[in-house]
Image (cartoon, rainbow, N blue to C red):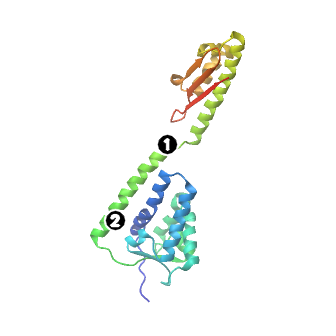
Amino acid sequence: MLELRPAKISDRFIAYILDAAPFACGYILHRVPLLWLGLYFFYQFLGNLLGATIGKRLMGLQVLRRDGQPLGVFRALLRALGYGLSTPFFNFGFVVAFFQPESRTLHDMISGSLVVEARAKNQGEAGLLFLAAALLITALFGGTIYLYKTNPTLSDILAVEKARDGLKILARIEEEYKRSHGAYTSSLSDLAQASGDVEEFKAAMSKIFDPNLFQIQAGNRGYRLSAAAKDRRKTRVTLAGP
């Protein structure tokens, strides 16, 4: 039997970046987590079954059983699903490879697999692949920042909901004002007076809305309230009545 040479961790890391980058980019562009996660696991399963993913082939690596035989369907599936255990807790399942004599990850140990060097690479090829991985990491980092800035957080969602609820309260005050004065008002001061507690009204407005982006349009027949919530994007919320 040929001697199996465990792959270097650095080579495995570059292969991982090359494999994962297209799916990560797909998620950034089309935010359907379950779709891209499912496609990535299927890709890993297929790569395990065939002996190597595209990234591993480019890096000259191969996935085998520890006795040098192909994984087979069951072990290939087990190894792909094992990614779900290796990834949580700051990629703990990958980190264990640093302390394992054969550089085996948690999913390798679960499936009884070993990633080995299938062929040698020249320096030019290795350098080019390293550069490609570095560029992909940079792109993914930028994409992650973009995703963070454009995706609403829980606090953003709550801020928008508070703003919508605040407009409903203002709408009720407008209706009370109409009953008392015969017409709706476009004055925020009038609404503050009609609320019954001017100071509390001002404090609530400052807490819920951006004070510089509040607008009221009103007349005898109706009104339109427009404000910016205090989320990161200053989401515009509107309410018209009656």
Q: Can you tell which quarter of the image residue 129 is in?
A: bottom left
Residue designated by label 2: 129
Residue 27, percent from left and from top: 50, 54
Q: Is residue 200 visible?
A: yes
Check the image and name the residue furthest to the top: 181
Residue 175, percent from left and from top: 70, 18
Q: Is residue 196 visible?
A: no
Distance CA(mark 1)–CA(mark 2) = 31 Å
> Quick one: label 1, few (<14), some, or many (20+) residues within 10 Å?
few
Residue 5, percent from left and from top: 41, 79
Q: Earlier in the sequence, mark 1 or mark 2?
A: 2
Check the image and name the residue furthest to the bottom: 1
Q: Is residue 129 left or right of residue 69?
A: left
47 or 81, nearer to the observer: 47
Residue 236's place in the image compared with 121, above or below, is above
Where's the C terminus, which quadrant?
A: top right
39 or 83, nearer to the observer: 39
- Which residue is depicted at the point 32% across and 74% down? 121
Q: Is residue 189 left or right of residue 46?
A: right
- Which residue is depicted at the point 48% across and 69% down? 97
Q: Is residue 127 left or right of residue 174?
A: left
Check the image and name the residue furthest to the left: 124
Residue 165, percent from left and from top: 65, 30
The disc placed on residue 225 is none
Residue 124's place in the image compared with 152, above or below, is below
**SS for tag 1?**
helix
- Name the amino acid type tagged 2: Leu
- Name the amino acid type tagged 1: Thr
Residue 190's place in the image compared with 25, above or below, is above
Residue designated by label 1: 150
